Image (cartoon, rainbow, N blue to C red):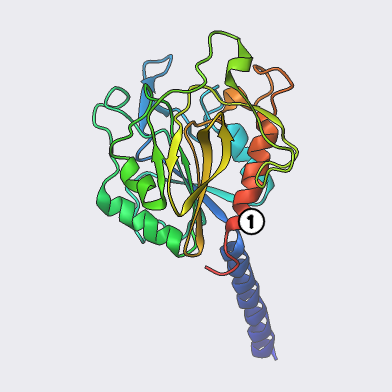
Amino acid sequence: MIKQFLAVVSGCMLAALAASAQQDRRQPVVTLDYHYNYEHKKDKAGNTIRWHYIWDENDSGGLSIWGHIFDSLGIRRDTLHEAPTAANLRGSDIYMIIDPDTDKESPAPNYMDPAAAKVIYNWVKAGGVLVLLQNDSLNAEFDHFNQLSDQFGIHFNGDSRNRVQGRNWEQGAFVLPQDHEIFPGVGKVYIKELSTLTLKAPAKAVFKDNGFNIMAVAKVGKGTVFAVGDPWFYNEYVDGKRLPAEYRNYEAAAALTAWLKKQIPAKR
């Protein structure tokens, strides 16, 4: 009798663990690159710390607020400190590369190369959702990085559009259509000093301004690529403290995150 009881209990425990494991596997994962963007600085105590566009950074240049948006949608956050491989991307549904380093930002920058670009391409083709947020001509690396984006028909021009002087916010304003496929109902947003895009198939512009390609999407195989030439959603411009209320960057971040989640194939 005791053996039967233990067998039942054991079976229930195994079933619960299996159900938990299945639930964990179903939870989408967003992985933020910490390899191509690998900046450091000294803190007040003189210690060298990792910073700039990272999840747990609460300062203006961090992504903690955007991270909380992912959390709210049930998307688990992760990081990738190494160059991407088929193995270390296998558990990721969304992979984001933001502001690849120049030699001014890092003494030994990790540049994109053809091998890594091919790995990422194959990962997207199999159903991955890739987010590429570059920067303007003074703050990011383009020659190597375009080896990746060019595969999807997206070329970062390495220019600097929407140069903003001081608090002249209008110089960084874009107005998204109310029925936009990614940002419905968002309206006015703020993006300063960004790289424009040159596009070819399979990429298409999802937002243009005065003839310039600002945002692009590419569909490859089962996967999706979204690209803009600016980090855009770092804390400074989504926390509601700096920008006037008419700029709806937080709402844009929430809309994009929801859209990214929808691009994840049901079965990968």
Is 183 positioned to the left or the right of 101 in the image?
A: right
Residue 75 location (% of width, % of height): 61, 51
Residue 81 location (% of width, % of height): 37, 44
Could you say which quadrant of the image residue 252 lies in? top right
Residue at the spot 43% in from the left edge and 23% down from the top edge: 160
Is 113 positioned to the left or the right of 244 in the image?
A: left
Residue at the spot 42% in from the left edge and 18% down from the top edge: 43
259 lies above or below 9: above
Q: How many numbered circles does the render carry?
A: 1
Is 35 positioned to the left or the right of 132 in the image?
A: left
| Quadrant, the N terminus | bottom right
Observer able to see residue 128: yes
- For the residue pair 156 and 35, the one nearer the viewer reads as 156
Residue 138 location (% of width, % of height): 37, 21
The type of residue carrying mark 1 is Lys
| Local SS, label 1 | helix
Residue topped by disc 1: 262
Residue at the spot 42% in from the left edge and 26% down from the top edge: 136
Residue 110 location (% of width, % of height): 28, 38
207 lies above or below 94: above
In the image as oriented, which residue stretches furthest toward the top?
166
Residue at the spot 36% in from the left edge and 47% down from the top edge: 150
159 lies above or below 119: above
In the image as oriented, which residue stretches furthest toward the front?
211
Could you say which quadrant of the image residue 99 lies in? top left
Observer able to see residue 90: no
